[in-house]
Image (cartoon, rainbow, N blue to C red):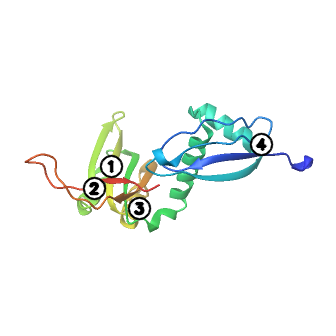
Amino acid sequence: MRADRQACQYQFLIGQTGRAPEPDFRNCRIRTILCSPRHRKNPMQRVTISVDDNMAKAIDDYMARTGYTNRSEAMRDLVRDALVRSHAIEETRECVASVSYVYDYDGRDLAMRLDKVQHEHHDLTISSMRTRLDHKFCMEVTLLKGETGAVRKLAEATIAERGVRFGQINLVPIRSDGHRHSHGEHGHSHEHSSPAL
């Protein structure tokens, strides 16, 4: 490596499950991470990136602040979040999402408008929970499930409503296992969905 651009090479594993032993990155030495895919449902792929000292410190600070003990897990979550925010998951047909926001319960019939939107999209709305913060403001969390583009459009329209504050969307791409089944004699028929990233 060139002296004028010291870089630490991070080897981390991208995937859904499992944790790898943490290598020592402190002196820009690379340790080999050995991990057998045969015990994993989703085999990992090794990806190597180079970052400068400032970014390496920012990653370490982020891990300390958020409680990560494994760089691979932290990097997987950061990459997953970036992919969702960049709309890279639009190829995924379905998703689940939580939409949280604060609003003035008495302001301009906003509560009624928000309820109306949920009723108009009952096919996407799973449930909604509201809590009163004080005599004026409420916080609401709405869970959505359905076609990714439709869910994103409804979620964005909700937090764009005049009077809605602190709107956040947490969108999770999902894929169905395609296997309908029931549990027990009187169980309803259903299929399972798993996170796609």
Dot 3: few (<14), some (14–19), or many (≥20) neighbours within 10 Å?
many
Tag of residue 152 = 3
Q: Secondary structure at mark 3?
A: helix
Dot 1: few (<14), some (14–19), or many (≥20) neighbours within 10 Å?
some
- 2 shown above or below 89: above
Q: Secondary structure at mark 1?
A: strand
Tag of residue 142 = 1
Dot 1 and dot 2 residues touching (CB under 8 Å): yes
Taking depth in this image into account, of 2 and 101 the one nearest to the observer is 2
Residue situated furthest left in the rendering: 185
What amino acid is at disc 1? Thr
Measuring 13% from the left and 52% from the top, which residue is drawn there? Answer: 188
Q: What separation in Å lies between label 2 and label 4 (alpha carbons)?
A: 43 Å
Q: What separation in Å lies between label 1 and label 3 (alpha carbons)?
A: 13 Å
What amino acid is at disc 2? Thr
Measuring 35% from the left and 45% from the top, which residue is drawn there? Answer: 141
Dot 2 and dot 3 residues touching (CB under 8 Å): no
- 61 shown above or below 46: above
What amino acid is at disc 4? Asn
Query: Which residue, given by chain and number where applicable, does mark 2 sit on?
Result: 125
Q: Is residue 15 visible?
A: yes
Instruction: Please state if 130 lies on the left or on the right of 188 as rendered.
Output: right
Mark 2, mark 4: which one is toward the viewer? 4
Measuring 71% from the left and 40% from the top, which residue is drawn there? Answer: 31
Q: What separation in Å lies between label 2 and label 3 (alpha carbons)?
A: 12 Å
Query: Which residue, given by chain and number where applicable, does mark 4 sit on?
Result: 54
Q: Secondary structure at mark 4?
A: helix
Q: What separation in Å lies between label 1 and label 2 (alpha carbons)?
A: 7 Å
**x and y percentages locating residue 44 in the rendered image:** 54, 51
Taking depth in this image into account, of 71 and 116 the one nearest to the observer is 71
Q: What separation in Å lies between label 4 and label 3 (alpha carbons)?
A: 35 Å
